[in-house]
Amino acid sequence: MLRVSIAGLTVFLIVSPSVAETLRPDLYPGAPRGILDVQLTFSGTGQWNSPNGVEYTKLVASRTANMQLAMVLADEGRGALVAIQGHDMNNLELPAARADLQVALAACGNEKLCLFREAMEYAAAEEADADGTDFAELPEDRFYNWVSDRSQPCVYGSLSVQDTGSGVYIPVPDPAVSFTYDRNGEQNLHAAADYMLERICDARLTYDTEEGYVSLRLPAYDLRVPTVLSGGVDYTGEATLPLLEGGPEHFFSLDNLVNWRGGSASGQFTIDDVGDASVGPYLQVPLSVNVAWTFTPNDY
């Protein structure tokens, strides 16, 4: 049950400290760079009704994420880092590994692109993919695989929350009272905590140069926003909340047939029931998300 202060205003505020992102060595010196501009717009409405037929809580959730992600061309090869037109190096079925493959994979350590490259070279010699195309017959530079660039600030932009709510409660022994509230907040991504940057700066994009398709993997999980509650509602100390609760770790948009206009490619898609927004212990509101993206290589 919500505790509501009728007189006055209850506000919880947390201010994010300025955090300097730790840059990493450039793993791809001289490689082309680009910007992946992403806008996520979440929306949903829900209501909890008390069994007493009088009390209720309503939430209209509105959240956004605007991200400008620095990208680098990490690999040009026969393998797709994000699944595209039936090609997916992550789910490649290989025959039993030989000793020479084991040695090559061990030399890669935990570097995923190196592991993928060795696997693809092995597959080219030993295996055909599901549609019968010999990997050795695919152009060596068919798939352009872009990843987040950690050698520079990997993201600019912000997350925001603009929720509104209303309801009725009974402050026994007094009669029923209606209430409204706003729940607002914003997080500057360049000043986000390290754990959030690790999640956000894990974007991937694969471009099929032969067929003209683009597939993307975008961040979605555990992105938190400092919040301000206004209107007299007390959430017993709530100071931050997830942009999305119970959602997937990533959003995928596969097999986008794109036209490059002015050096950019773009697309848009919607996912229903992607996760929730909650208020108090009783109400979870299903959210949909509209995703709009534009990818612009800087020098390629």
Image (spheres, helix red, strand yellow):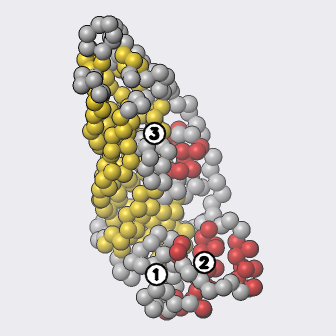
Asked whether 105 or 78 is in front, the reply is 105
Q: Nearer the viewer, mark 2 or mark 3?
A: 3
Name, please, the residue furthest toward the front: 51
Indicate the position of residue 181 as horizontal and vertical percent values.
31, 23
Q: How many marks?
A: 3
> In the image, what residue type sits under mark 1?
Arg
Q: Are marks 3 and 1 in contact (CB under 8 Å)?
A: no
Q: What residue lies at 74% left-to-right and 74% top-to-bottom?
A: 106
Indicate the position of residue 265 as horizontal and vertical percent values.
33, 65
- Residue 229 got which mark? none
Q: Secondary structure at mark 3?
A: strand
Q: Is residue 94 left or right of residue 60?
A: right
Asked whether 245 or 219 is in front, the reply is 245
Whether residue 168 is visible to the viewer of this picture, yes or no, is yes
Q: What residue lies at 39% left-to-right and 78% top-to-bottom?
A: 85
> In the image, what residue type sits under mark 3?
Pro
Few, some or many C-alpha atoms within 10 Å of disc 1 (few <14, some 14-19, many ≥20)?
some
Q: Earlier in the sequence, mark 2 or mark 3?
A: 2
Quarter containing the C terminus: bottom left
- Residue 142 got which mark? 1
Q: Secondary structure at mark 1?
A: loop
Which residue is denoted by mark 3 in the rendering?
A: 242
Q: What residue lies at 48% left-to-right and 31% top-to-bottom?
A: 240
Cα–Cα span, label 3 and label 1: 38 Å
Which residue is denoted by mark 2 in the rendering?
A: 117
Quarter containing the N terminus: top left
Q: Earlier in the sequence, mark 3 or mark 1?
A: 1
Occupied quadrant, residue 258 = bottom left
Q: Is residue 285 above or below residue 93?
A: above
